[in-house]
Structures are given as C-alpha cells and as structure tokens.
Amino acid sequence: MKRRPYRFYLPMLLLLGLALTGQAPAQDNSDSPQYYRVEVILLGQPPIAETFAEAPSETPPPLPVRFAWPLQDPGEEGLGYTRVPESERALNTIARRLRDREGFTVYWHTAWEQPGLDADRAQSVALPADLGADAPRGMLRVYRSRYLHAEIELRAPADDDRTWVMSDARRMRSDERHYVDHPALGVIIEVTEVPDPR
C-alpha cells in the first residue's frame, strides 16, 4: 500500500522549523509534576493527486469514550485547562503563514498550561463546537509517563459523505515543534516546560 509522501510538505516543515518525530525521556519529579505549555495548530491542507493508504471512511469509528473538557478563559471557574492569551502564544507567526498559503485552513490555534500527569489523570481537551460545519471535531490529550505523549482523536467530514479519521498517539520531545501529518489534516504541536504556576 502506498504511503503518503512527505516530499510535498518538506519545504513547509523546513520553513516552519518543525520536527516530524522526537523521543526523549520526560524529566522525573516525584514531589510535584512538571508543568507544560501546550500549543496546537489544527489545519486543513490540500490533497495530493496520488493514492494513499489513508482514505475517508464510510463507517468511521466513534471517538473514544472519555471525558474531555473545553478550555476555560482566564478567570473562569470549572473543569478544563485555562487558555493562554493570544498575545503569549509562540506559534502566531506560523499560524499566520499557514493562513496566507493557498489551500490551507487554520481551524484552531490555541495554547494552555497543564501539569505533566500520567495517562489516567491527564485531562483531554475538547475541540470547540463552534469551529464550523466543515471543521474537525474531537479531542487531544498530552500526558507524561517516562516520555511525553500526545494523543489526537479527530473526525472531519469529507466531501462525499465519508469521514476523515485522524487517530494518532506518539512520544514527543519537549521544547520542539512537532508536525503530525495526514492526507487532509495536520496538527502542529509544541510542548514547552514552564514553571509551576501555583
């Protein structure tokens, strides 16, 4: 089966300074968890006129049965991590470049801070419901065990009553930008260590 080539997106990756993969142990702190700032750009990208292993599904699997909370604005109370103000985001220039590129759509660009908890305790972040009828829906989760991990579960409508499925779980390196590729979608994610805000 033919895999999606990276040659089309390699110039963009080099331009944006992204890492396709990264594996490094997360620092261990038994007294209190390390805190991280997570920044995410979720984008739609133009197709390539080739056949790939991935294709829209007529019967997509449901999203995982897992609690996922939307981000909270600063000062709000309730469940969910607190959104970082737009002026403090590190990837604003990259998001702007993507918006200016023909064929690309930035569906969601946000950032939040969270403790580096294990998979059983880390919260999942739900995508907002107001991104638009053609936008993906789903959730993301970042957690820490020996390594940092990111889990991405997205469902996006295709143009033929089928559904694009993005289900990805990978180890990550902190303080680097990572690009998660897909035939119709893309996720840029950066996880950076920050001081404990408490």
Image: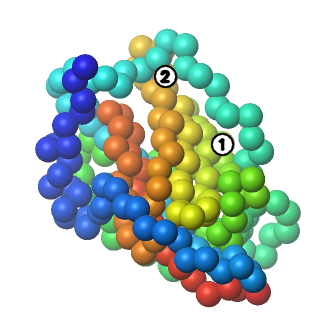
Q: Secondary structure at mark 1?
A: loop
Q: Can you see residue 110?
A: no
Q: Earlier in the sequence, mark 2 or mark 1?
A: 1
In the rendered image, which quarter is residue 48 located in? top left
What amino acid is at disc 1?
Ala
Q: Position of residue 91 (x, y in %)?
A: 40, 69
Which mark, residue 52? none
Tell me the colour scheme of the image: rainbow
- Location of mark 1 (residue): 129
Q: Is residue 57 above or below residue 174?
A: above
Closer to the camera in the image, 179 or 88? 179
Q: Please identify the quadrant where the C terminus is shown.
A: bottom right
In the displayed structure image, the side of residue 193 where residue 48 appears, left or right: left
Q: Position of residue 174 (x, y in %)?
A: 46, 71
Q: Please identify the quadrant where the N terminus is shown.
A: top left
In the rendered image, which quarter is residue 17 located in? bottom left
Closer to the camera in the image, 50 or 159? 50
What amino acid is at disc 2?
Thr
| Between marks 2 and 1 in the image, the one whose residue lies nearer the viewer | 2
- Location of mark 2 (residue): 163
In the displayed structure image, the side of residue 175 where residue 110 appears, left or right: right
